[in-house]
Image (spheres, helix red, strand yellow):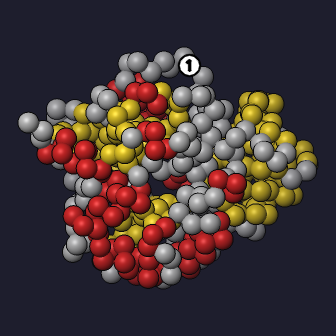
Amino acid sequence: MADKFEKIMEKFLNPISDLKGRIKDSLYFLRKDGCFVFSHGYYHPTPGYFIGKIIYYPLAEGDSDIWGRRYQAMHKAWVDGEHVAIMNDVQIVKQYEVDPSLDPDKPRPLVADYTLEFPIEDFVGYFDPARSLQLCREMYPDTVRPWADQAADLMDFPLEKMGVTGSLAYGKIEEEDMDFDVIFMGALKENLRVRDRLHRLSEEPDRRVFEFGRYWPIRVYHNGFLLCPFFVYQDWDEVPLSEAEISVIEDDVTVSGTIADDTHNAYLPIILELKDVFLNGKEREDIRVVCYDGSVRGEYWEGERIWLEGRLLRITDRKRTYEAVAVDISFNISKKQPDHYPI
């Protein structure tokens, strides 16, 4: 007889074939061994694989309950009664410990060194963000339904273009957090309008979000819940880096520059266009930054001067060939903080 976990998974899961070979950012997948895996970005270079991370893994003494089964989070932990973030460099080591089938000597993606490649055939299915939101609205008429309605109203955004990720992807409210992990799945201009509105709202003191020891510039509190946004491209033609060939020019470089274009600063990967650039201390032409650390989505804006360490790459996509610097982790990118950010 199916237990509660199996019944919920049967209700929420979608077959991998529904993806039609196109894996977007922020999708939750359920692996055959019970692990929940999260997709990162749109660059999945190896046929039959996608890049991502294990987020929850089955553990008898784990501190999370997912529909009657014990799990342990990979990205956060309870310390002295409160959640603390586990940084990417620690997470990547733990991924190999949890899953001995992963080969630590296998090269990781050139633009995303703190992620891994997972064979799609290892998964039972995935959780479709829009469908999960519909199911959660039915399951939680007093919480998720008003969260979604209020978020759509606050952002003036169509409800049918919204979805959920995080635990809501598989129908679970984490009562200790009460976050609404909402995905905005609009055209680029629609999503930019939402991003900019969130950025303005986050400057209001009673809406500001401080979590894991820092300020989050595009998360906001609204009517008692935390609105945590994710952005997904509606139109595949607007996706940078989805179909790209990448090679290394130089492994360790230092770069400084002023952000000339922040259009893609709230997506994963974060993509910034820099001007007034210095690479290894020498002036050079404009350059693109590709950052696969989702913790700094919405962190870097046009006009700001940034400093970073990364890997110099040559990228050929559908439109052109160009050079870019890949930054794998937030430790390797910084800026002079604007005075109005309480960071």
Q: Quadrant of residue 106?
A: top right
The residue under label 1 is 106
Q: Give above or below for 302 relative to 154.
A: above
Q: Residue at x 85, y 41 (%)?
A: 321
Q: Which of these two is toward me, 47 or 264?
A: 47
- Classify residue 231 as left or right of residue 173: right
**Residue 286's x, y, as percent?**
86, 53
* Secondary structure at numbered mark 1: loop
**Residue 165's x, y, as percent?**
40, 55
Count residues near mark 1 (Cα–Cα under 10 Å), then give few for <14, some for 14-19, many for 20+.
Answer: few
**Residue 11's x, y, as percent?**
25, 50
- Classify residue 170 as left or right of residue 7: right
Which image quarter holds the N terminus? top left
Which three-letter amino acid code belongs to the residue tagged 1? Lys
Q: Which of these two is toward me, 60 or 156?
A: 156
- Classify residue 177 as left or right of residue 3: right
